[in-house]
Image (cartoon, rainbow, N blue to C red):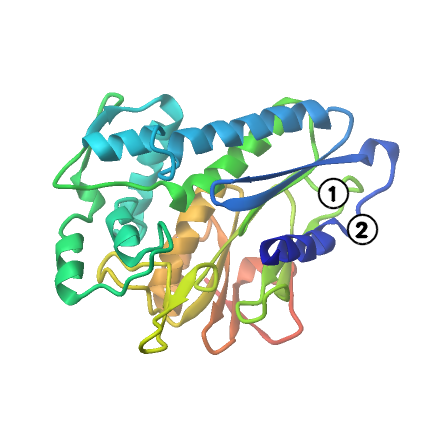
Amino acid sequence: MRKILIVFTILTLLLSGCGSREDGAASTRYLTTMDTVMTLTAYGPNREDGLDKAQAEILALNAALSTGLSDSEISRLNESGSAALSPEPLALLERALELYDSTDGLFDPSVYPLVKLWGFYDKNYHVPTAAELSETLSRVGADHIRISGNTVTLEDGRQIDLGGIGKGYASQRACEILREAGVSSALLSLGGNVQCLGSKPDGSDWNIGIRDPWQEGALYAAVKVSDQAVITSGGYERYFEDPDTGVVYRHILDPRTGRPAESGLSSVSIVTADGTLGDGLSTALYIMGLEEATAFWRTHSEEFEMILITDAGTLYATEGLQNRISSSGKIHFLSR
């Protein structure tokens, strides 16, 4: 119910002001897959055909990528240590390895053993001992993943999970499929991933809400976009509290320490035309923290803009969003 409330709140903001012309008629599909609630809304005469194909693509990607399905390609690879992958999972893994390199290993598709150790995979939560962390960290590091043709080999006990970029890739592919079907206006919400095809039917920008990290169902800011994705990672998404100590452990794990990231950031939103890139960077920059994330953006500012909310509640945004972001509080703009 809480997920539905959040989706409803955000969609109310996103869809407000849409045109009511005949060619602006909308159709919406709701589905639960990739461990999240998804809402796909498309406009215009070709919307039903486009949504059929986009939904089919998302479900097919989940069937291939999900670590929760024993017969998925990724699960079979993790089980055997070596397997041939079909084109889409292979391309996504290759993209994940590119992000691993560009973020100096902070986006790491091989953290799956750590995710399982902490219990974020099956909700059997566990605070690991130093010995458990050390042993598990010995099996983390995407530099031990080998690709030869379409065959992937995971060395030294590595296992992978492409969930860190899977939803971003799925939303991007869905938009491509909708465009190919003749749809020119659509809004896709895949959990914390929102991707827009074109603008609203009336030609105005979409107004995408940025969730308040501390108040469920509330918004901290909003950003106007067209033909872009807004992808958010935050420690509030999944966490557990140790019943003995009261310490809260959040699901975004730092591959350097094996522990939940403690970067001083509560939320990172990436604004980009590339949903796959945005999904990976929202995680990596969350781990980096304000200063390192800002330095990374200055080096790659042509690829994305970002919105950062610190643990203290301070809101930062890159200067490219200066005329597009709004908030009831002060916004601190980061310059190149």
- Amino acid carrying label 1: it is Lys
Q: CA distance from mark 1 to mark 2?
A: 8 Å
Disc 1 crowd, CA 10 A, few/some/many (<14, 14-19, 20+) = many
Tag count in the figure?
2
Image quadrant in which you'd find residue 19: top right
> Mark 1 near mark 2, Cβ–Cβ under 8 Å?
yes
Q: Residue at x 83, y 31 (%)?
A: 23
Q: Quadrant of the C terminus?
A: bottom left
Check the image and name the residue furthest to the right: 21
Residue 109 visible to the viewer: yes
Q: Amino acid at mark 2?
A: Gly
The residue that label 1 is drawn on is 200
Quick one: SS at disc 2?
A: loop
32 left or right of 326 in image: left
Residue 7, position as x, y percentages in the image: 64, 52
Where, quadrant-wise, is the N terminus in this rendering? Answer: bottom right
Q: Earlier in the sequence, mark 1 or mark 2?
A: 2
Quadrant of the image occupied by residue 132:
bottom left
- Which secondary structure, mark 1? loop
Residue 10 badge? none
Query: x and y percent of residue 46 in the render?
Result: 73, 24
Q: Residue at x 81, y 36 (%)?
A: 24
Vertical relation: 252 (above or below) 102:
below
**20 or 258, which is in the foreground?**
258
- In-front residue for pair 126/277: 126
In-front residue for pair 9/93: 9
Name the residue carrying label 2. Answer: 17
Image coords of residue 217 (percent x, y): 63, 63
Residue 100 image offset from top left, x and y in percent = 29, 46
Q: Residue at x 45, y 68 (%)?
A: 266
In the figure, is residue 222 to the left or right of 288?
A: right
Dot 2 surroundings within 10 Å: few (below 14), some, or many (20 or more)? Answer: some
